[in-house]
Image (cartoon, rainbow, N blue to C red):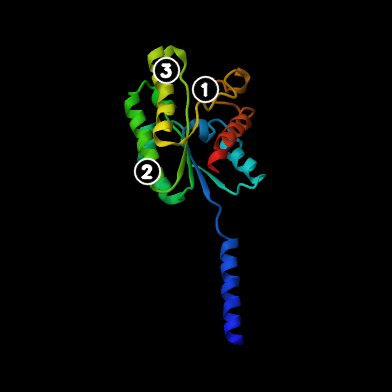
C-alpha cells in the first residue's frame, strides 16, 4: 500500500513538473521589412513590442519574428513550410504582399501565394491573422483597389483575422517614417504593436 502511494505521488509530481515547464504557444510573425524592423534594432520592431505587451497580460505567448526584408509572397511561400515545421505556431500573423505591389507584380499570383500559406497554416492547426497594406495612388486606381481588396477577400474566404492596413496608425504622421517614407521609425512601432494586439484579441 505504501509503495503504491509513493508511486502515485511520484507520477503526480512529474506530471505537474512537465506542465510547469511546457513551452508557451508560439505566435509566428511572417512578413517583410515592415515586420522585420528595417533600419531598427530587433527589439524596436513591433513584433518584439507585441511580445513585451503580451507579457504584461494573462496571454502567455511567445512571439517568433520570421520576417525577412524584401520578401515577396513567392519567396514567403517557398520558406513557409519550414517555418511552420520549426516553430509549430498556434497563431500565424501573415504580413506579406507589399513588395509584390510595389514591384507591380501580378496580384492574382500574390493572392494565390497568400491563399496557399493560409491553407498550409490552417492545415497545421494554426489560426491565421492576415495583415494588409495599401499602395500609393500613383499605381493607378484599379491596381491599388485590387491590391487592397486582396486581403479582405482572403480573410473572408478563409475566415481569418484581419488588420486591413498595418500602417494606419502612422500614415498621417510623416515624422514617424524613416527617410525612405516607407518604413516607420522606432517611435511609430509601439502604435503598430498596439493595433495588432487589439486585432489579435479575438484569436488569443
Vertical arrangement, residue 173 with respect to residue 54, above or below: above
Give whichever of 146, 62 is nearer the camera: 146
Disc ID at residue 196: none
Secondary structure under tag 1 reads loop
Residue at the (59%, 72%) spot, across then down:
12
> Percent x, y for residue 92?
47, 41
Q: Position of residue 145 (x, y in %)?
A: 42, 18
In what element is the residue under mark 3?
Answer: helix
Disc on the earlier residue, 3 or 2: 2
Label whose residue precedes the other's in the sequence (3 or 1):
3
Q: Quadrant of the C terminus?
A: top right
Disc 3 from disc 2: Cα separation: 27 Å
Q: Quadrant of the N terminus?
A: bottom right
Earlier in the chain: of badge 1 and badge 2, it is 2
The residue lying at 39 percent from left, 47 percent from top is 82
Is residue 71 among what the camera can see? no
Task: Measure the alpha-carbon separation of dots 3 and 1.
Answer: 16 Å
Residue that numbered label 1 is attached to: 182
The count of marks equals: 3
Compared to residue 110, the image places residue 138 above or below, namely: above
Amino acid at each position: 500500500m505504501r509503495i503504491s502511494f509513493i508511486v502515485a505521488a511520484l507520477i503526480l509530481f512529474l506530471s505537474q513538473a512537465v506542465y510547469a515547464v511546457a513551452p508557451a504557444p508560439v505566435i509566428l510573425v511572417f512578413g517583410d521589412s515592415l515586420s522585420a524592423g528595417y533600419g531598427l534594432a530587433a527589439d524596436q520592431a513591433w513584433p518584439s513590442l507585441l511580445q513585451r505587451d503580451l507579457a504584461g497580460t494573462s496571454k502567455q505567448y511567445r512571439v517568433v519574428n520570421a520576417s525577412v526584408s524584401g520578401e515577396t509572397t513567392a519567396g514567403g511561400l517557398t520558406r513557409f513550410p519550414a517555418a511552420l515545421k520549426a516553430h509549430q505556431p498556434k497563431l500565424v500573423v501573415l504580413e506579406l504582399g507589399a513588395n509584390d505591389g510595389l514591384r507591380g507584380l501580378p496580384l492574382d499570383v500574390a493572392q494565390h501565394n497568400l491563399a496557399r500559406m493560409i491553407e498550409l497554416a490552417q492545415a497545421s492547426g494554426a489560426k491565421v491573422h492576415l495583415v494588409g497594406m495599401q499602395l500609393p495612388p500613383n499605381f493607378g486606381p484599379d491596381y491599388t483597389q485590387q491590391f487592397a481588396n486582396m486581403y479582405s477577400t482572403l480573410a473572408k474566404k478563409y475566415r481569418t483575422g484581419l488588420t486591413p492596413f498595418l500602417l494606419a496608425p502612422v500614415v498621417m504622421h510623416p515624422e514617424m517614417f524613416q527617410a525612405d517614407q516607407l518604413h516607420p521609425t522606432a517611435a511609430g512601432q509601439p502604435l503598430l504593436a498596439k493595433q495588432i494586439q487589439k486585432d489579435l484579441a479575438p484569436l488569443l
